[in-house]
Image (cartoon, helix red, strand yellow):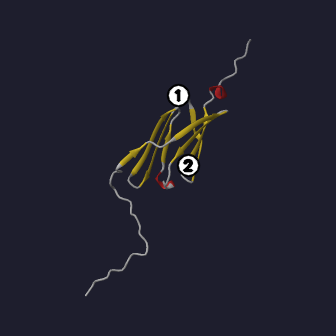
Amino acid sequence: MAVVEKTPTSVETAPTNEAPRYRVSPRYGVDLEGSKVILQIALPGVKRETIKMKALKDYFTLTAQRGEILYSLDLDFGLEIEPSKSKAEYSEGLLRIEFERYNPLESAFDVKIE
């Protein structure tokens, strides 16, 4: 007599609390377009929910996980940005972030000659 188990109709992969097995630096490109800094990062197969980003005035950090792979990127821009004016889009494995360059003259005071 053979025991037959029912085959699952869908296989779900539950997130584990284990540390990722591989740490990888993703491919990326940086472009300057006028007053904007455009950062494009390849994150193939990554779900939007796993992407975590932080930006300071001259520093950017990103982590994203796909299975056992942790994508990790730390960038020092070498110029100042305004993190509060950043925009990010993620589509088909490509993350595109647009930063506004900091312009110190925007908040400068006019000096008048007497």
Residue reaching furthest to the front = 1
* Residue visible at 39% across and 75% down in the picture: 8
79 versus 88 height, above or below: above
Where is residue 103 drawn, in percent x and y?
Answer: 63, 29
The outermost residue toward the bottom is 1
What amino acid is found at the position of numbered circle 1 in the picture? Answer: Gly
Against 96, residue 35 (above or below) is: above
Residue at the farthest right position: 114
- Residue at coordinates 40% horizontally, 50% vertically from top-left? 69
Mark 2 to mark 1: distance in Å? 24 Å
In this rendering, position of residue 87 left or right of residue 9: right
Image quadrant where residue 97 sits = top right
Q: Amino acid at mark 2?
A: Leu
Q: Position of residue 18 (x, y in %)?
A: 32, 54
- The residue that label 1 is drawn on is 78
With respect to residue 21, does 78 lie above or below?
A: above
Closest to the observer: 46 or 102? 46
Check residue 94 in the rendering and tell me which mark sits there, or answer none.
2
Q: Nearer the viewer, mark 2 or mark 1?
A: 2
Label 2: element kind: strand
Q: Are marks 2 and 1 in contact (CB under 8 Å)?
A: no
Is disc 1 placed on a helix, strand or loop?
Answer: loop
Residue 75 is left or right of residue 17, and the answer is right
Q: Residue furthest top?
A: 114
Residue found at x 53% / y 28%: 78
Count residues near mark 2 (Cα–Cα under 10 Å), then give few for <14, some for 14-19, many for 20+: some
- Residue 76 at x, y = what percent? 49, 32
Q: Position of residue 1 (x, y in %)?
A: 25, 88
